[in-house]
Image (cartoon, helix red, strand yellow):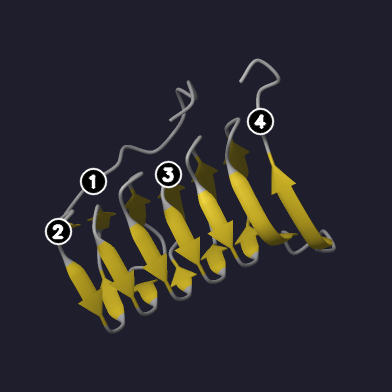
Amino acid sequence: MFGNKKRRPTRVDSVIGQQTKITGDISFVGGLHVDGAVRGNVAARDEEKATLTVSERGSIEGEVRVPYVILNGVVKGDVYASDRVELAANARVEGDVHYRMIEMAMGAEVNGKLVRIADETRAPLALSHVTMSVVSEDA
């Protein structure tokens, strides 16, 4: 997303359109792209390969449990990314972010804890009660 050539290709199997509002939990396989609003938990059934993309127009109110999360919209709830989370410039998380690998652009915001999911050989790292905002001094 931010110039990393090793990133996994993003496959989209399902789309929630900009004018769509969903109330209820979502369970999916493969790739899910959200341009609309979801009020409920979003979880992947395929733990290794699933990808969630939330555009700058998309929002989720609920817990997210997906291996690979690409966020440029809003999530009000905890995010659990067992593989990787990418926070683009318009990303805003109001909750804790649990991740194995994180990439954060200027402008992205996390209002909660950043909790690294450790490998078996490492102890978990956590920053408690962090409000983080990455902004450019030129803005």
Which mark, residue 135?
4
Q: Quick one: quadrant of the N terminus? A: top left
- Kind of residue at disc 2: Gln
Amino acid found under the numbered disc labelled 4 = Val
Where 62 falls versus 93 (above or below)?
Answer: below
Q: Earlier in the sequence, mark 1 or mark 4?
A: 1
In the shown orientation, is residue 124 left or right of residue 38?
right
Looking at the image, tell me whether mark 4 or mark 3 is earlier in sequence order: 3
Q: Nearer the viewer, mark 3 or mark 1?
A: 3
Whole-number angstrom distance, CA of label 3 to CA of label 1: 17 Å
* The disc label shown at residue 11, or none: 1
125 lies left or right of 109: right
Give the answer, above or below, for where 17 lies relative to 95.
above
The CA distance from mark 4 to mark 2 is 30 Å
- Label 3: few (<14), some or many (≥20) within 10 Å? many
Foreground: disc 2 or disc 1: 2
Which comes before the other along the chain, label 3 or label 1? 1
Quick one: 17 or 2, which is closer to the camera?
A: 17
Q: Secondary structure at mark 3?
A: loop
Q: Examine the rendered structure and indicate whether residue 6 appears above or below residue 81.
A: above
Spot occupied by residue 41 in the image (x, y as percentages of width and height): 39, 78
> What is the spatial separation of the Cα atoms under label 2 and label 1, in whole angstroms?
22 Å
Amino acid type at image mark 3: Asn
Is residue 99 visible in the rendered image? The answer is yes
Circle 2 residue: 19
| Label 1 vs label 4, nearer the camera | 4
Q: Which residue is mark 3?
A: 72
